[in-house]
Amino acid sequence: MYTLDQRHQARPAIENPLSSMVLGVEHNTHFVLILTIAGYARAIAKVLDLQNLPGILGIVATNSSVWVSPRRDYSVLHLYKHISRLLGHGDFRE
């Protein structure tokens, strides 16, 4: 991760690095979107990929977001809740 001024670089907390990288988890009827600190989306995508969750069809990571496509439309809410809990963002709205 590169930045011109290190003082403005967001850093995850060492005691809880996974949840501190994630700014939020959202969903609609088609996919789950994970918003991260800039530069950490690929790490979160890798963590999800290594979980081998059966409900995930595919994962795409940008610099600061992770797009998760479920295998079936009806599984989006279940997948959203599972990902939210896994990433330490269990306070989700339905």
Image (cartoon, grey):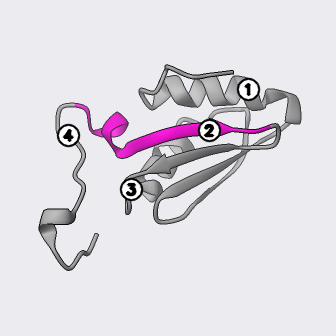
Q: Which of disc 3 and disc 1 is earlier in sequence?
A: 3
From the image, tell me which residue sits under label 1: 77
x then y, percent, for residue 83: 56, 31
At label 3, which amino acid type do we have? Answer: Tyr
Residue type, mark 2 in image: Glu
Among the two numbered marks 3 and 2 on one chain, the one whose residue lies closer to the N terminus: 2
Tell us which disc is closer to us: 2 or 4.
Answer: 2
Please state which amino acid type lies under the numbered disc 1. Answer: Leu
Residue at the far right in the pictured view: 73
Mark identifier at residue 40: 3
Q: Nearer the viewer, residue 67 or 71?
A: 67
Disc 2 target residue? 26
Q: Is 32 situated left or right of 45 in this image?
A: right
C-alpha gap between disc 2 and disc 1? 10 Å
Q: Residue at x 45, y 32 (%)?
A: 87
Mark before the other along the chain sequence, 4 or 1: 4
Residue topped by disc 4: 13
Task: Give the vertical position of 16 relative to 39 (above or below).
Answer: above
Q: CA distance from mark 2 to mark 4?
A: 22 Å
Real-space Cα separation, disc 1 to disc 3, in angstroms: 24 Å
Where in the figure is residue 48, as x and y percent of width and height?
A: 53, 41
Magenta segment range? 16-28
Depicted 74 relative to depicted 37: above or below: above
| Quadrant of the frame with the N terminus | bottom left
Identity, as a three-letter code, of the amino acid under mark 4 = Ala
Residue drawn where x is 38% and y is 56% of the image: 40
Q: Earlier in the sequence, mark 2 or mark 4?
A: 4
